[in-house]
């Protein structure tokens, strides 16, 4: 039995800080920008999480994305239990991982070959190595505030926890590595053209979040990603579309399913995570066959993992994807419709200036008159309103991402009762935000 005997959030946080830096195993969990004690979760089911004090809340974090069908979906739990009974890890190929790769390709046909890894960070890190291997070039273009995990080259001007903590980047990154990353403002075609005009023959790839969602959500301008692909290709570089957060969430086929780009306008490599693992540590990269086949053992780009394609994680991911049919995506959209409408009504009633950005069922709130389009816009909003808003929601029984720079995640398990609880909590939170 691994359940802790410490039973209050405050006591656990005190205890946690004596053994774990900051008391958390990932910075965004720390309540850094909102203050107070993180809630230690005892269990989660459907749209709800229950903390160690027994307080149940409607969850709009969904483990930061994976829980597309809600927490502890019975079919996923059953699939994992059955897989566990057959063995936890083999370090050898399995039939189920082939089926998962096939399911990813079925949904995103431009991912002609798929490699399974364990985290989104690994997926993007490998994608970059692959792009460098494919082009024989070093430089990488990324966008200001985009978060692609915590590998060295990608922690330059990143969003998510860095944005929450107002950190410009991480220490511990060698200057030589940071110097291989060119950071550009998002949404700025002239900046991309200028970077390629100056360094075009040294750029291996552009990496972009398929829909930037780690500085609040920014709905991509139609055509911008096709422009990135054309520009990269014209200079012999690749486009990496990071769908770790958007993949199989914003649409059955991810952001690619919404944009539908092909040929010269399509990304060469896509990365997936979160939903694809069904709540277990699993992520993937996929792409054009001739690029992907450069990976070892076929090609010279090395990548490996003791637990890659772990049978429990594959069972969870495959079960979730197979269950995520049109009705699930329609429900996710309906949940997002109801919550965003309630959010707008409550904030408008208190005269709080705000906008809501949305892609599929993914959305985020900004305390600003117009939707932020860049990291600078996101930072310029009335950030101070977030902490009182967040805590009022928490007190009202709703767990939101504890950062204004993160998107809200709904699940298909958010039924009308769960939505009602969110709507009921909003007026007091809007009043708190207005104060
Ligand atoms: N890429 C994007 C767009 C993400 O949102 C994240 C995590 O939030 C990652 C990559 C990194 O994934 P992981 O946390 O699984 O390493």
Image: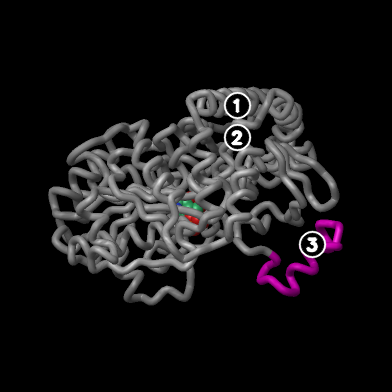
Side of 401 relative to 121 (left or right): right
Is 334 in front, or is 346?
A: 334
| Mark 1 surroundings within 10 Å by alpha-carbon count, few (fewer than 14), some (14 through 19), many (20 or more) | many
* Residue 335: image tag: 1
Q: Does the magenta stretch include residue 5?
A: yes
* Residue 278: image tag: none
Q: How far apart are marks 2 and 3 (CA)?
A: 29 Å
Secondary element at image label 3: loop
Cβ atoms under marks 2 and 1 closer than 8 Å: yes
Locate the C terminus by quadrant.
top right
Q: Which residue is drawn at 46% across and 57% down?
A: 309
Q: Which of marks 2 and 1 is in front?
A: 2
Q: Is residue 307 magenta?
A: no
Side of 125 relative to 349 (left or right): left
Where are the magenta residues, as a range?
1-23
Q: Distance between the residues labelled 3 and 1?
A: 36 Å
Question: Residue 360: x percent and y percent?
Answer: 47, 30
Locate the N terminus by quadrant.
bottom right
Q: Earlier in the sequence, mark 3 or mark 1?
A: 3
Q: Which of marks 2 and 1 is nearer the N terminus?
A: 1
Q: Earlier in the sequence, mark 2 or mark 3?
A: 3
Question: Residue 296: x percent and y percent?
Answer: 29, 66
| Mark 2 surroundings within 10 Å by alpha-carbon count, few (fewer than 14), some (14 through 19), many (20 or more) | many
Residue carrying label 2: 411
* Location of residue 337 with respect to 399 vertically, above or below: above
Q: Distance between the residues labelled 2 and 1?
A: 8 Å
Secondary element at image label 2: loop
* Location of residue 287 with respect to 415 vertically, above or below: below
Mark 3 lies within 8 Å of ligand 1 (Cβ measured): no
Q: Which residue is drawn at 47% across and 50% down?
A: 273
């Amino acid at each position: 039995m691994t359940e802790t005997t410490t039973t209050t959030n405050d006591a656990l946080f005190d205890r946690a800080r004596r053994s774990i830096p900051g008391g958390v195993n990932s910075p965004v969990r720390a309540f850094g920008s909102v203050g107070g004690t993180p809630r230690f979760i005892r269990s989660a089911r459907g749209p709800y999480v229950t903390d160690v004090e027994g307080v149940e809340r409607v969850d709009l974090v969904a483990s930061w994305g994976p829980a597309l069908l809600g927490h502890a979906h019975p079919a996923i739990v059953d699939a994992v239990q059955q897989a566990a009974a057959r063995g936890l890890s083999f370090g050898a190929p399995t039939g189920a991982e082939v089926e998962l790769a096939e399911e990813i390709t079925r949904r995103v046909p431009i991912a002609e070959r798929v490699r399974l890894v364990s985290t989104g960070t690994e997926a993007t890190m490998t994608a970059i190595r692959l792009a460098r291997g494919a082009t024989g070039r070093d430089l990488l273009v990324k966008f200001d505030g985009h978060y692609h995990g915590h590998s060295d080259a990608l922690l330059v001007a990143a969003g998510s926890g860095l944005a929450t903590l107002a950190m410009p980047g991480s220490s511990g990154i060698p200057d030589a590595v940071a110097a291989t990353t060119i950071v550009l403002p998002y949404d700025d075609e002239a900046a991309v053209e200028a970077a390629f005009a100056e360094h075009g023959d040294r750029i291996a790839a552009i990496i972009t979040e398929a829909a930037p969602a780690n500085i609040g959500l920014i709905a991509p301008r139609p055509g911008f990603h096709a422009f990135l692909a054309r520009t990269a290709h014209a200079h012999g570089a690749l486009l990496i579309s990071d769908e770790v957060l958007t993949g199989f969430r914003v649409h059955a086929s991810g952001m690619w399913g919404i944009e539908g780009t092909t040929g010269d306008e399509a990304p060469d490599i896509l990365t997936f995570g979160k939903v694809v693992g069904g709540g277990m540590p699993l992520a993937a990269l996929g792409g054009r066959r001739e690029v992907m086949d450069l990976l070892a053992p076929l090609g010279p780009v090395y990548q490996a993992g003791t637990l890659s394609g772990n049978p429990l994680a594959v069972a969870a991911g495959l079960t979730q994807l197979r269950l995520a049919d049109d009705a699930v995506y329609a429900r996710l959209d309906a949940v997002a419709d109801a919550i965003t409408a309630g959010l707008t009504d409550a904030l408008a009633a208190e005269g709080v200036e705000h906008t809501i950005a949305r892609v599929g069922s993914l959305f985020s709130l900004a305390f600003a008159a117009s939707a932020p389009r860049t990291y600078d816009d996101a930072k310029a909003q009335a950030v101070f309103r977030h902490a009182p808003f967040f805590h009022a929601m928490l007190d009202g029984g709703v767990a939101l991402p504890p950062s204004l720079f993160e998107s809200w995640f709904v699940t298909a398990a958010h039924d009308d009762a769960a939505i009602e609880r969110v709507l009921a909590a909003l007026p007091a939170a809007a009043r708190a935000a207005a104060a």
